Image: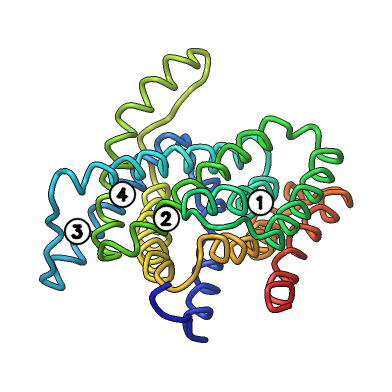
Amino acid sequence: MNTKPLPIDYLKLHLIVVILGFTAILGRLTEVSTLGVVFFRTFLAATGMWAVAQFQKKSLKISLAQAWPLLGVGAIMSFHWICFFGSARASTVAVSLVTFSTTSFFTSIIEPFVRKTKISWVEVILGVLVVMGMYFVFTFEGKYIVGILIGLVGALLSTVFSVINGQFAQKYDAQTVTFYEMVGAFGAMWIYIPIIIFALPNEHFQLIPTNYDWLWIGILGLVCTVYPYNEMMHLLKKISAFTLNLAINMEPIYGIIMAYFIFGESEKMTSGFYIGGILILLSVVLHPFLKKK
């Protein structure tokens, strides 16, 4: 890493986690389908990043050879969001958030290969703890198996673009990376939407937002995307993708609490679910102590 993280960096990371914990709730509050949510989120995020750059009189120009990898990562990111919101719709916000916490396990294995470093067995052990937590979630919340599986695919995709972004953060300006990734995410939705609609002919997809949908998607695309993803690129200059994803494991705590107050009893889970959630969150608490030793 270029520089060591400061206490303010961890505060920023904590704020990002709180904001991200609200995204699944916003996605479920809308009546528009998951495809519509991601389509307009990516459009607003790309537009928002461009507007910020124009206001700051900052150039976002890069070569086509540099842009293509960023656009490709954006395509991965948009499919991750489809899985993330789709998991919440197929199960509950709580289940979607907890399955997303498995990113730390995937990162402990994928990041060392990408960065060509030794595998940290501390990170692997913490990742296994996450898997144990997921076992309890699977065992006691079997009725949400589809939502859990979709969520796990989304977690894997999140790991992939987080690790790759760790490499981009050392080469490019954070704002430039975020802008092109959002453009790539929006462009990919023009491909994903017809493919998914064709693959699921019996499903009804409401793509156009109505009434309050515009408000929720506006908050999702601008407040919950432009700031946190741009800030995460800055943080990846100082911390590893594993540390980032492990901290984001705290997202279920905020998301589940907020979801319970907003959606009520429908978000109440069995005791096994909470045991699994505690094991996953325990990995976050143990990480700094084990790394120090």
Provide the residue designation for mark 3: 50
Residue at 34% across / 34% down in the picture?
Answer: 189
Label 1 Cα neighbours within 10 Å, binned few <14 / some 14-19 / many ≥20: many
Relative depth, front residue between 109 and 27? 109
Among numbered discs 1 and 4, the one appearing first in the sequence: 1
The amino acid type of the residue labelled 2 equals: Leu
Of badges 1 and 2, the one in the foreground is 1
Q: Are marks 4 and 2 in contact (CB under 8 Å)?
A: no
What's the residue type where badge 4 is placed?
Answer: Glu
Point out the tag, 4 or 3, that comes first from the N-terminus: 3
Badge 1 amino acid: Phe
* N-terminal label among 1 and 3: 3
- Determine the image quadrant of residue 209: top left
CA–CA distance in space, label 4 to label 3: 12 Å
Query: Label 1 vs label 2: CA separation?
Result: 27 Å
Marks 1,4: beta carbons within 8 A: no
The residue identified by callout 2 is: 220
Q: Give the CA separation, mark 4 to mark 2.
A: 16 Å
Q: Nearer the viewer, mark 4 or mark 2?
A: 4
- Pointer 1 residue: 105
Q: Nearer the viewer, residue 109 or 127?
A: 109
Q: Residue 47 in the image: x percent, y percent?
A: 23, 54
Quarter holding the N terminus? bottom left
User: Sequence-wise, which precedes: disc 4 or disc 2?
Assistant: 4
Q: Which residue is mark 4?
A: 181
For image coordinates 39% across by 70% down, the residue present is 237
